[in-house]
Image (cartoon, rainbow, N blue to C red):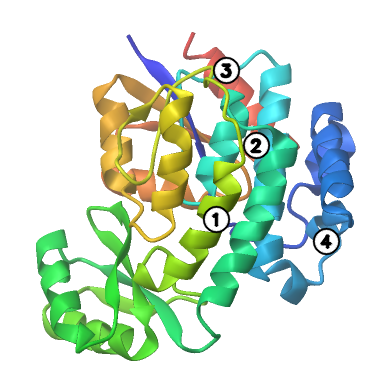
Amino acid sequence: MSHIAFIFPGQASQYPGMGKELFEKYEPAREVFEEADRVLGFSLSQLCFEGPEDELKLTQNTQPAILAVSVAAYGVLAANGIQPDYVAGHSLGEYSALVATGALGLPEALTLVRNRGRYMQEAVPIGQGAMAAILGLDEEVLMGICAEAAQGEIVSPANFNSPQQTVIAGSAGAVQRAMKLAKDRGAKRAAPLPVSAPFHCALMRPAEIQLQQDIARLCFSEPAFPLVNNVDAVEVATSARIGDSLVRQVCSPVRWTESMQFLIRRGVEFFVEVGPGRILSGVLRQIDRNLKLANVENEKSLNETLTFLSKTE
């Protein structure tokens, strides 16, 4: 039997303007943005729709913004009677996925990810950390490159996005050395990423400690449908494991390839990317070109997805 999975992005392909059409046309989406504005105490909706881009791209604003857009898109799907068999979210997207399952309330999630973004930004001064995308090297080779490039600093895989693409993170100098070694050893590409902090590596330990204190104060509900988590790439079907997964995620790599392969083994053939952009859809094509993919970020993509899903019934 074929199943549907909703996948939630951790970054956006475009910033100002995201979510605006959903807000204007669909009541469930409007309710999400209005609640976000109330919870955060400022107009996140205006920041999403109009920018300025440099302010929207500050991590402490980016994280709640992407979460709000993703949850708004999910709300519109749910209002149309569409529910997934499984959910997963890439990095920050795991919080959106948890809101979709009912395991985490939207107000708690918004506050948590705004703090998460601030903790991450404060953990490493700007310019001291870096991230880079490495294409065309397998995991074992890249692990060896990172160990060689470290030279007393930190550099390690941060996102295992697909068999062809891994992102590394760490100290700026160590990342530069790893990029050079990767090119020397046959990488198709080694490119720095325009990020404000080196996410998912040991340099995020101060952020992990702070976030752990916030998460310890929360009570998670049982998820309405299973979530595949980033840190272990396994099904999380009870509330007891959710908080621990979110804490460990801060310094651990995102095991996206394994997560998607897990879902494919469970019979998932239809993946819907719920939130701004189609970054995860592109990555999924690198994992399995036979998958059926759709996304929801505006009216056009929503209608296309509803048509797409009606044909799978």
Describe residue 224's horizontal placement relative to residue 260 as left or right: right
Which residue is the site of mark 2? 301
- Indicate which label's residue lies in the foreground, 1 or 2: 1
Where does residue 21 sit, x and y in percent of width and height? 81, 43
Which of the 4 image quadrants contains residue 304?
top right
Q: CA distance from mark 3 to mark 2?
A: 17 Å
Q: Secondary structure at mark 2?
A: helix
Question: Which residue is rendered at x = 42% and y = 80% of the image?
Answer: 130
Residue 291 drawn above or below residue 281: above
Q: CA distance from mark 1 to mark 4?
A: 25 Å
Describe residue 20's horizontal placement relative to residue 159 as left or right: right
Q: Secondary structure at mark 4?
A: helix
Q: CA distance from mark 4 to mark 3?
A: 29 Å
Q: Nearer the viewer, residue 137 or 289?
A: 137
Alpha-carbon neighbours of circle 2 within 10 Å: few (<14), some, or many (≥20)? few
Cβ atoms under marks 3 and 1 closer than 8 Å:
no
- Tell which circle, 3 or 1, labels the residue nearer the N-terminal end: 3
- Tell which circle, 4 or 3, labels the residue nearer the N-terminal end: 4
Residue 83's disc is: 3
Which residue is the site of mark 4? 47
Which residue is the site of mark 1? 211
Question: Which residue is rendered at x = 39% and y = 51% of the image?
Answer: 248
Q: Amino acid at mark 3?
A: Gln
Question: Which residue is rendered at x = 42% and y = 67% of the image?
Answer: 205
Where does residue 243 sit, x and y in percent of width and height? 48, 39
- Indicate which label's residue lies in the foreground, 3 or 2: 3
Residue 116 drawn above or below residue 308: below
Residue 310's disc is: none
Q: Amino acid at mark 2?
A: Ser
